[in-house]
Image (spheres, helix red, strand yellow):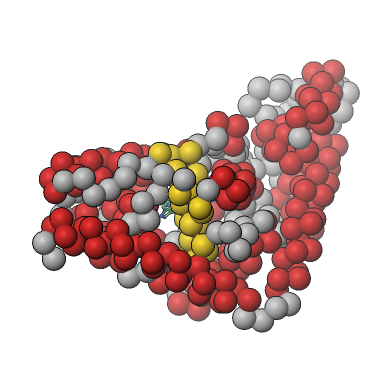
């Protein structure tokens, strides 16, 4: 089984990225041959500063390695290092109906907000389809917000196969229901673009500020607190585990404890959960050249597979 996923280097990864994509991807490494990449080409649709992008890529690579990406087993690389990807994106774009892309949220949302949308943003899902199809991927672990992109990928693969004969495997998304949408500090989906994130490796002061800033209702301290839809409880369940979350839930129902106390418990649980990874990150950071060595090796492995798939594509379309 080949497992593939990508993450954009657009800022510090947060609990949503970790529980929605990074952790499932890390756990899957043992179950097959994994290919994980940093989607720097996709990030170009939003990051407009070369130095900043290079820095984000480096930091994200350290973050992912610290969280448990195993470079001995998994090919870890930069998207832009595999030239077959943009080549395939072009070929796929020639079988992509405009209407299909016009219906995609990433583009529609930006347009609805009246923000300028580039051609790159419009064709974002085609590049993503190329990322997936060029490695003959079987499963793609992602958060729920990427579901539509996976559907586009499958649609394009089917359309291409119908037109030119069977070339592509049809990939399956892997979306874990329990962590498909991790809420942010304002209760909406946690996302870098909403400014509601809790970063994995923020300083203690930063984490404290974010967690104590989580929006809660104004139930008085002594009264029972609503359990349904509570961001605090949802996040606590992720970092503290089911048993401790049950205890907190029970205490919500009983009343007599204020939200400040629950926030303190969540803050401590987040620190504890990421403590080993934080230490590992510090160790990795001390080794100059390590990240680049890992990404170089990963690139070699990725290119090898991409080359063989592109041969099939060239053969089929006549280039
Ligand atoms: P962001 O929305 O913060 O920019 P990305 O688009 O870089 O995040 O997402 C990277 C990965 O993390 C994707 O697989 C995405 O589905 C997942 N992800 C992002 N936010 C969440 C969330 N709040 N809950 C679950 N998964 C998420
Ligand atoms: N669009 C994804 C995101 O924003 C990143 C990504 C790019 C990706 N290419 C991919 C994810 C291929 C999975 C497979 O998170």
Foreground of the two, 231 or 282: 282
Work out whether residue 146 can be spotted.
Answer: no
Exactly how many numbered labels are in the figure?
Answer: 0
Foreground of the two, 98 or 128: 128
Residue 139: quadrant of the picture: top left
Quadrant (top left, top right, bottom left, bottom right) of the C terminus: bottom left
**Above/below status of 105 relative to 201:** above
Name which residue lies at 48% across and 49% down.
3
Work out whether residue 159 can be spotted.
Answer: yes
Please indicate whether residue 311 sits to the left or right of residue 211 in the image. left
Name which residue lies at 55% across and 31% down.
177
Please state the horizontal and vertical placement of residue 16, each as a whole percent of the image: 59, 46
Please state the horizontal and vertical placement of residue 80, each as a whole percent of the image: 39, 69
Name which residue lies at 71% across and 21% down.
226
Residue at the limit of the structure toward the bottom, as seen here: 288
**Above/below status of 244 relative to 279:** above
Please state the horizontal and vertical placement of residue 116, each as a whole percent of the image: 31, 58
Name which residue lies at 43% across and 64% down.
302
Foreground of the two, 205 or 266: 266
Foreground of the two, 3 or 223: 3
């Amino acid at each position: 089984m080949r497992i593939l996923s990508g993450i954009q280097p657009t800022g510090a990864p947060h609990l949503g990225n970790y529980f929605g994509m990074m952790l499932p991807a890390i756990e899957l490494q043992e179950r097959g041959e994994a290919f994980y990449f940093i989607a720097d080409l996709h990030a170009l649709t939003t990051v407009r500063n070369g130095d900043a992008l290079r820095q984000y890529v480096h930091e994200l690579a350290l973050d992912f390695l610290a969280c448990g990406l195993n470079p001995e087993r998994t090919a870890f690389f930069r998207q832009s290092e595999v030239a077959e990807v943009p080549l395939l994106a072009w070929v796929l774009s020639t079988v992509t109906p405009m209407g299909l892309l016009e219906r995609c949220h990433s583009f529609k949302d930006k347009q609805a907000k009246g923000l300028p949308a580039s051609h790159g943003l419009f064709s974002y899902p085609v590049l993503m389809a190329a990322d997936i199809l060029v490695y003959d991927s079987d499963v793609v672990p992602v958060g729920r917000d990427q579901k539509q992109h996976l559907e586009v990928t499958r649609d394009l693969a089917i359309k291409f196969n119908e037109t030119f004969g069977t070339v592509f495997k049809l990939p399956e998304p892997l979306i874990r229901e329990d962590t498909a949408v991790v809420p942010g500090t304002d209760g909406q989906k946690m996302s870098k673009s909403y400014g509601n994130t809790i970063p994995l490796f923020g300083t203690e002061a930063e984490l404290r500020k974010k967690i104590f800033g989580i929006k809660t209702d104004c139930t008085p301290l002594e009264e029972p607190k609503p359990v349904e839809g509570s961001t605090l409880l949802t996040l606590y369940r992720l970092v503290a585990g089911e048993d401790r979350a049950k205890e907190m839930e029970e205490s919500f129902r009983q009343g007599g404890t204020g939200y400040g106390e629950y926030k303190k418990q969540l803050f401590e649980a987040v620190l504890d959960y990421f403590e080993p990874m934080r230490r590992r990150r510090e160790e990795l950071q001390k080794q100059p050249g390590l990240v680049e060595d890992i990404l170089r090796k990963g690139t070699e492995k990725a290119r090898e597979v991409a080359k063989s798939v592109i041969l099939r594509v060239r053969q089929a379309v006549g280039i």
